Amino acid sequence: MSNNFNRYADLYPEFEIENVKKAFKTRTPISPLHAGDTLPAFHINKKNIIAASDILKSVQGPQSITQLIDRPLVLAFHSIHWNGYGNKRLEELKDIYADIRVMGGQLLLVTTDEKQHFDEATSALQLPFASIWDQHNLIAGKAGLYSATDPIWDRISGVNEDVPAPAIYVLTPSLKIVYSAVDLWLEKSVERRDLLSAVYEASHQGSHGIAI
């Protein structure tokens, strides 16, 4: 009995090593940007555009985001690998999109997913706003939402891919963050009133020639 137990017990560690993701010994925690910070500039490649409405219509080659925006930008991060949370976030953004435009803003969705996978997963939603593939999580990394050694799957049940934390930012044309909503635990909904107020205030300041 004892010999059989020891023999079978020896098999379990090997199985776990092959099938269970392990925490990193050297961890660089994510450090999300917040209101008052400035997002480092990033470039958009035409090949990474999923939907080219609004600000992305003129993109032909690699182009800096600062050359594309002249009014407040709602920058929303997304992944289909957030499961139900990801679809809920898209539905909330679709619902608020018209109001963002009325308040003087634009919306850009930054997703971890290539066009084919994104379109297959979201076709029923008929999303009206611009979206891009964040290849290698480069933009999310600039926002402090992604670290290869601090993965979401290490703390959020049901997430099994290497994806960033959810966040929504309102940026001025100079990429200063005037509103931030980071959701490290995938628990929150879009704060509609606060988001729209931030877009309106940033747009209103710009219309009066105040440097933002």
Image (cartoon, rainbow, N blue to C red):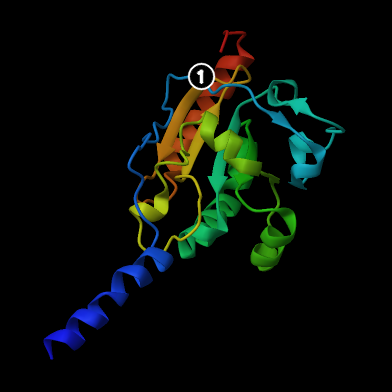
Callout 1 secondary element: loop
Q: Is residue 137 visible?
A: yes
| Front-lying residue, 165 or 23 | 23
> Residue 207 at x, y = what percent?
63, 16
**Disc 1 residue crowd, few under 14, some 14–19, many 20+, Cα 10 Å:** some
Q: Amino acid at mark 1?
A: Thr
- Farthest bottom residue? 1
Q: Is residue 128 left or right of residue 10?
A: right
Q: Is residue 92 above or below residue 183?
A: below
Q: Is residue 22 above or below residue 53?
A: below
| Front-lying residue, 187 or 117 | 117
Q: Residue at x 85, y 33 (%)?
A: 58
> Residue 188 at x, y = what percent?
37, 51
Q: Residue at x 44, y 45 (%)?
A: 165
> Residue 203 at x, y = what percent?
59, 23
> Where, by quadrant of the figure, is residue 110 drawn?
top right
Q: Residue at x 50, y 31 (%)?
A: 143
- Farthest front residue? 3
Give the residue at mark 1.
Answer: 38
- Farthest right residue? 60
Q: Residue at x 63, y 39 (%)?
A: 107
In the rendered image, the quadrant that contains the C terminus is top right
Q: Is residue 114 left or right of residue 185?
A: right
